[in-house]
Image (cartoon, rainbow, N blue to C red):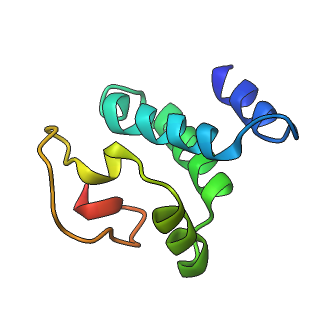
Amino acid sequence: MVIDTVSKLSQKPYVDKKRVIEIVIQILHYDGKRLPEETRKSWEGLRDRLSGTDFSSLMERYVGMDILEDKLDEEGNVVESKPSTDRKSGPAGR
């Protein structure tokens, strides 16, 4: 399965972990609604394992990475609000 491959790759020392996180976030942002629930939850679990779920880890992720999808709502409109630390709604209330 692709998720397993991405997960294994993220553990390799030569793979840029930030790039993997960015790609997982893009998959969830653009394809999340179309994915079967189980698959979406697997991608969300991978995202959480890679970036963490506690405040400190999330702050490091949002400050250390400038990801376009963090600035867009589900329709692709630019949002100006601060990122939410609630993983259910995602950044900026997604």
| Whole-percent x, y for residue 4 in the image | 73, 29
Question: Looking at the image, which residue is at 58% across and 44% down?
Answer: 21
Residue 89 appears in view: no
Name the residue furthest right. Answer: 13
Residue projecting furthest to the bottom: 55
User: For this view, does 21 lie left or right of residue 80?
Assistant: right
Residue 76 visible? yes
The quadrant of the picture occupied by the C terminus is bottom left
**x, y percent for residue 67:** 41, 47
Q: Quadrant of residue 27?
A: top left
Residue at 11%, 44% (x, y): give it: 77
Count the labels in the image: 0
Q: Nearer the viewer, residue 1 or 54?
A: 54
Q: Eyeballing the image, is 88 above or below 42?
A: below
Q: Is residue 15 left or right of residue 61?
A: right
Question: Is 57 on the left or on the right of 92, as rendered?
Answer: right
Asked if residue 39 is positioned above or below residue 53 in the image, the reply reads above
Residue 81 coordinates in the image, percent (x, y): 19, 68
Out of 13 and 29, give the one closest to the viewer.
Answer: 13
Name which residue lies at 42% across and 52% down.
66
Looking at the figure, which quarter contains the N terminus?
A: top right
Give how far across and how far down residue 8 sits, in percent: 81, 33
